[in-house]
Image (cartoon, grey):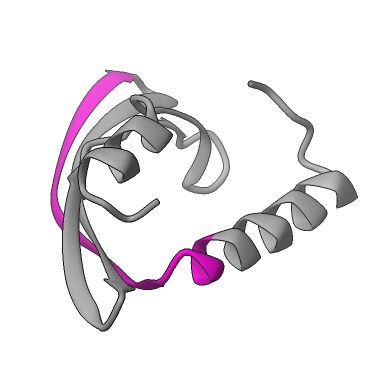
């Protein structure tokens, strides 16, 4: 999926936050980052996160490992990311 960094991004982010709150998301914690530099202006961050959800009064911790594409040309900026099948992972842990 791709998109533009314009007003539609803000709308999509707001809808995304609303969705995550609706499924019980309470916290997301970055556990580890390993940055691989590609050149003077680009890098790839391999990250490990833990998301915490409350479902039926039970806290569920879900690990996930997105890869984030970074641009350092003018200011540090993430311009894309790669993740696995989020819905499958949330089903596996009983969140959705």
| Residue farthest bottom in this picture | 57
**81 or 88, which lies in front?**
88
- Whether residue 24 appears in magenta in the rendering, the answer is yes
Count of residue discs: 0
**Residue 94 position within the rendered picture, expressed as x and y whole percent measured from the top left:** 26, 51
**5 or 21, which lies in front?**
21
**Residue 61 position within the rendered picture, expressed as x and y whole percent measured from the top left:** 16, 61
Q: Is residue 33 placed above or below 53 in the rendered structure?
A: above
Task: Name the chief secondary structure element in magenta.
Answer: strand
User: For this view, does 49 lie left or right of residue 75?
Assistant: left
Residue at 20% from the left image edge and 77% from the top image edge: 58
**Residue 51 position within the rendered picture, expressed as x and y whole percent measured from the top left:** 26, 60
| Residue farthest front in this picture | 56
**86 or 46, which lies in front?**
86
- Whether residue 27 appears in magenta in the rendering, the answer is yes
Q: Is residue 92 placed above or below 17 in the rendered structure?
A: above
Residue at 28% from the left image edge and 37% from the top image edge: 89
User: For this view, does 73 lie left or right of residue 82?
Assistant: right
Magenta span of residues: 20-38
Residue at 26% from the left image edge and 83% from the top image edge: 57
Q: Is residue 48 placed above or below 61 in the rendered structure?
A: above
| Residue farthest right in this picture | 7
Q: Quadrant of residue 43?
A: top left
Residue at 57% from the left image edge and 42% from the top image edge: 74
Q: Quadrant of residue 4?
A: top right
Report the quarter where the N terminus lies.
top right
**Residue 41 position within the rendered picture, expressed as x and y whole percent measured from the top left:** 44, 26
User: For this view, does 75 lie left or right of residue 8?
Assistant: left
Q: Is residue 5 placed above or below 95 in the rendered structure?
A: above
């Amino acid at each position: 999926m791709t998109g533009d960094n314009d007003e539609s991004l803000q709308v999509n982010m707001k809808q995304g936050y609303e969705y995550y709150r609706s499924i019980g998301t309470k916290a997301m914690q970055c556990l580890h980052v390993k940055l691989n530099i590609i050149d003077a202006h680009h890098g790839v961050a391999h990250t490990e996160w833990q998301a915490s959800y409350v479902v039926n009064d039970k806290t569920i911790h879900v690990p996930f490992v997105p890869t984030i594409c970074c641009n350092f040309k003018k200011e540090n900026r993430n311009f894309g990311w790669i993740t696995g099948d989020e819905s499958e992972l949330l089903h596996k842990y009983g969140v959705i």
